[in-house]
Image (cartoon, helix red, strand yellow):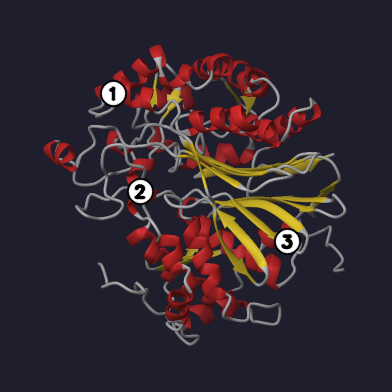
Amino acid sequence: MTEFDFLSGRRPSTYGTGGMVATSHALASSAGLAILAQGGNAVDAAIAASAVQCVVDPHMTGIGGDCFVLYAPKDGPVRALNGSGRAPAGATLAALSARGVTALEQTSVHAITIPGAVSAWCRLHADHGRLPLSDVLAAAIHYAEDGFAISTRVAADFANYANDLRGDVHAAAMFLPGDQLPTPGDILRQPELAQRFREVGERGAAAFYQGENAAKMARHLQSLGGLHTEKDFHDATDGADWQEPISASYRGHELLECGPNGQGLAALLILKILEGFDMGPEVPLANRVHLQAEATKLAYHHRDALIADPAHCEGLAERLLSDDAIATLRARIRMDRATPPTLWDEPEHKDTIYLCVVDGEGNAVSFINSIFHAFGSTRLCPETGVLFHSRGASFRLIEGHPNCIAPGKRPMHTIIPGILRGEGRIMPFGVMGGHYQAAGQAAFVSAVVDRGMDLQAAMDEPRSFAFDGELQVERTMPEEVVQDLAARGHKIKRLPRPMGGSQAIRLDLATGLRTGASDSRKDGMAIGF
């Protein structure tokens, strides 16, 4: 065992033998743990923690966003819940063209799909929860109504994205009162949001998607030029649906993901490509980063070209994870230089929260809730307090593309909860950071499996991400490694801010030991009992 450096400024993993919660905000972690202490199960705790983060991390998540879940009951198969919303029934290419829409930008009302998070929470709770939903949402109601103290990372993020907020008078009034940036310790209240949580706790998903709230949200979006109707909201009441997870093996472990329209397939593809290379502790860091970058470019190229609403990409996972496809892609990687990505069998074509819970019985939840960009679309409905996400910005406006916008269609999603199983252990885990998530999952899994790293240490490693023609690197990446990568042809972009965040809890099935970790790049923690 390597001795931990207690003067490093880092923290060790957390250990426990009862329930454990890992989130990216301390108030969310404590809310989830409180639910476990009240006799709730992993599902109750996950929903409670997510709801709190919708209040205290409003730039990252909210009830106006989407949700994906992997649920691993102690006895029974892993289930995948797709809580991503759909485009309005009127969202046709012709309708958008008639409005002069040529791109789906973050702040466009047409980037707002009908939110799916509340439907997912209520479906998950109805099928697997234990405590009354009103009890589960009590902490979120309290923080929204009575206020919470803004944390250091949240204050920094507010400052970074303040100009985006100022583009919407209602969002600015809520989050920048008096046009003043919040500082750590300032109190923020969201009374309208508190009432939405109270209504959902009492009446379920119908309280959000039907009646006055649906009418108010539809009316506000229409005032911005949106195609949304009350019926679109009504039809989303039971929109979340259970699906079979997809999976792939990696050096004797099994990684499970939600299938398309999520990008979990990209994480599996990266790891299957890397499985053909040595990624062990003796391999130089520059080589590992290079291999991860090359595998990422190949996987994301396929993601952008092929992943879409599951009805529009049937059988895609089986095709891309086949031995032939993986071997073809692997063969395109060169160790001495960076190469452009290509599709394996076709002609070439030119912010979020994650949390996980393991309860005292051994049930595990891998849970992600998102509004996509920071503060989502920045469009806030003043009558309901709902800040809408921007997930529709992932749609294409290309006729015939699998991910082309269409009525009732789900867009390609970046948010992906994961579960890793093997060697008598099960580990719900996830990585935040928008497009980075699939690459981040692969890097984390490789660190844990290939080098046997401690969970917290694996999260704290310097990060890199090959995306959009650049190799982004955190400033903690050693300079000699950066120069090596540049010499291989990577276009380096040094990031001034941390990349993403992550959480994980590993359950040893034989001993019952829970090992948890929460990324030091965020305000959260892994806590248990």
Q: Quadrant of residue 248?
A: bottom right
Question: Picture coordinates of residue 486 (x, y %)?
Answer: 47, 79
Q: CA distance from mark 1 to mark 3?
A: 48 Å
> Which residue is tagged 1?
229
Q: Is residue 70 above or below residue 179?
A: below
Amino acid on which disc 2 is placed: Ala
What residue is drawn where x is 28% and y is 36%?
A: 110
Say which of 447 and 320 sits in front.
320
For the residue labelled by badge 1, is the local secondary structure a helix, a strand or a loop? loop
Q: Quadrant of residue 493?
A: bottom left
Question: Picture coordinates of residue 105 (x, y %)?
Answer: 30, 44
Amino acid on which disc 3 is placed: Ala
What residue is drawn where x is 50% and y is 78%?
A: 485
Q: Are marks 2 and 1 in contact (CB under 8 Å)?
A: no
Q: CA distance from mark 2 to mark 1?
A: 23 Å
For the residue labelled by badge 3, is the local secondary structure a helix, a strand or a loop? helix
Tell me the mark number nearer the camera, choosing from 2 and 1: 2
For the residue labelled by badge 2, is the local secondary structure a helix, a strand or a loop? helix
What residue is drawn where x is 42% and y is 80%?
A: 328
Residue sitting at the far bottom: 336
Question: Picture coordinates of residue 449 (x, y %)?
Answer: 69, 68
Left or right: 201 as drawn, with respect to 414: right
Q: Say whether residue 358 is visible.
A: yes
> Which residue is tagged 3?
457
Q: Earlier in the sequence, mark 2 or mark 3?
A: 2
> Which residue is tagged 2?
311
| Number of marks in the rendered image | 3
Q: Are marks 2 and 3 in contact (CB under 8 Å)?
A: no
Left or right: 410 as drawn, with respect to 100: right
Q: CA distance from mark 2 to mark 3?
A: 39 Å
Amino acid on which disc 1 is placed: Thr
Name the quarter where the N terminus is drawn: bottom right
